[in-house]
Image (spheres, rainbow, N blue to C red):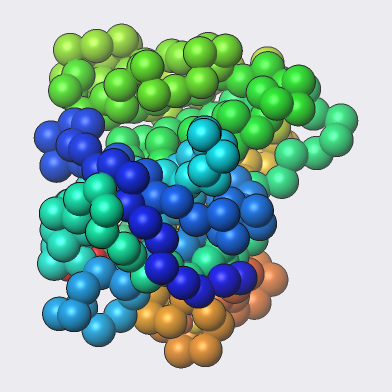
Amino acid sequence: MKQGFALVISNAQVMPGVYLIWLESPQIVAEAKPGQFVMVRCGEETLLRRPLSIHQLANESRKAKLAFLFTVAGKGTHWLSQRQAGNNIDLLGPLGSGFSIHPASHNLLLVAGGIGIAPLCFLAQEALNQGCSVRLLLGASTASQLYPKHFLPAEAELIIATEDGTAGRKGMVTDLLPDFVGWADQIFACGPTLMYRAMADQKQQLLKAKSPQISLEVGMGCGLGVCYGCTVKTKRGLKQVCKDGPVFDLQDILWNELNY
Ligand SMILES: Cc1cc2nc3c(=O)[nH]c(=O)nc-3n(C[C@H](O)[C@H](O)[C@H](O)COP(=O)(O)OP(=O)(O)OC[C@H]3O[C@@H](n4cnc5c(N)ncnc54)[C@H](O)[C@@H]3O)c2cc1C
Ligand code: FES
């Protein structure tokens, strides 16, 4: 884990209210694993750093870069959306546990709900580098909220669902699951809690048997295992999302006890 300033290389709105920011940070890039996050200091007015998943890595022109993909949700992310090339941003990371790809797995199914694509893009890239096949189920409320295809690894097979049917299959991204679970050696998901609840409620034994790994988003204070602000109840006792997660097995979370 490193703390230091990173130079903004670019920052652009890629969908309404959603920004893609690239920063130069060789120290974080050297250690980062898919599923990990970074605590970002978002200006003077927000006391606490904000957690953001590592979205992508790149090494271009001898610059080790990382990207965050973020929705403007409030003060901190609004501040971040206003940063420009040449600004410096204080980062602390990488933090938390990442997704784990089993050595025997070949077919990986990734399920992204909305901004949940953020950590899965890095995972897809890593899995493809390891020679795996990747199918990505991408869901959004409407076509204009779908993450643009050209930002995703070209080798990943993309299957789309929108709630209003303006692109792909009409419905929730979880409605696509039954068609693909059989193919998958492992399943990874990131999205809103409602999406995880829908997955946990599915009666499909096959889905349960594949113990999907999910990235849990809860409010965080320190991001370092100090404040206990991110504690959740699991079948294995109380866990801190920032230290023991944010990646957990879907089945381990006590969903009825989660207040998100
Ligand atoms: C491990 C982790 C990784 C994350 N990765 C990403 C990412 O890659 N991209 C992204 O857009 N967001 C991500 N988030 C959510 C992001 O941290 C929050 O949106 C951000 O902290 C909001 O800060 P703010 O100051 O803009 O808004 P605030 O003023 O703090 O809050 C505005 C609104 O957002 C809600 N909110 C605050 N924190 C969270 C949270 N953790 N989860 C859900 N809602 C929240 C608040 O309840 C409030 O309604 C992640 C969260 C966690 C815990
Ligand atoms: S955010 Fe402080 S312990 Fe997890």
Rendered image quadrant of residue 240: bottom right
Q: Position of residue 52 (x, y in %)?
A: 39, 57
Rendered image quadrant of residue 26: bottom right
From the viewer's perspective, is 184 left or right of 121? right
From the viewer's perspective, is 219 left or right of 61? left
| Residue at figure coordinates x 61%, y 20% from the top left | 134
Question: Which residue is at the far right?
Answer: 104
Q: Position of residue 68 (x, y in %)?
A: 38, 47
Q: Nearer the viewer, residue 113 or 2?
A: 2
Q: Position of residue 4 (x, y in %)?
A: 46, 72
| Residue at figure coordinates x 17%, y 12% from the top left | 166
Q: Nearer the viewer, residue 168 or 29?
A: 29
Q: Would you place residue 235 above or below residue 85 in this image? A: below
The answer to whether any part of residue 231 appears in the image is no
| Residue at figure coordinates x 64%, y 61% from the top left | 97
Q: Quadrant of the C terminus?
A: bottom left
Question: Which residue is at the far front?
Answer: 61
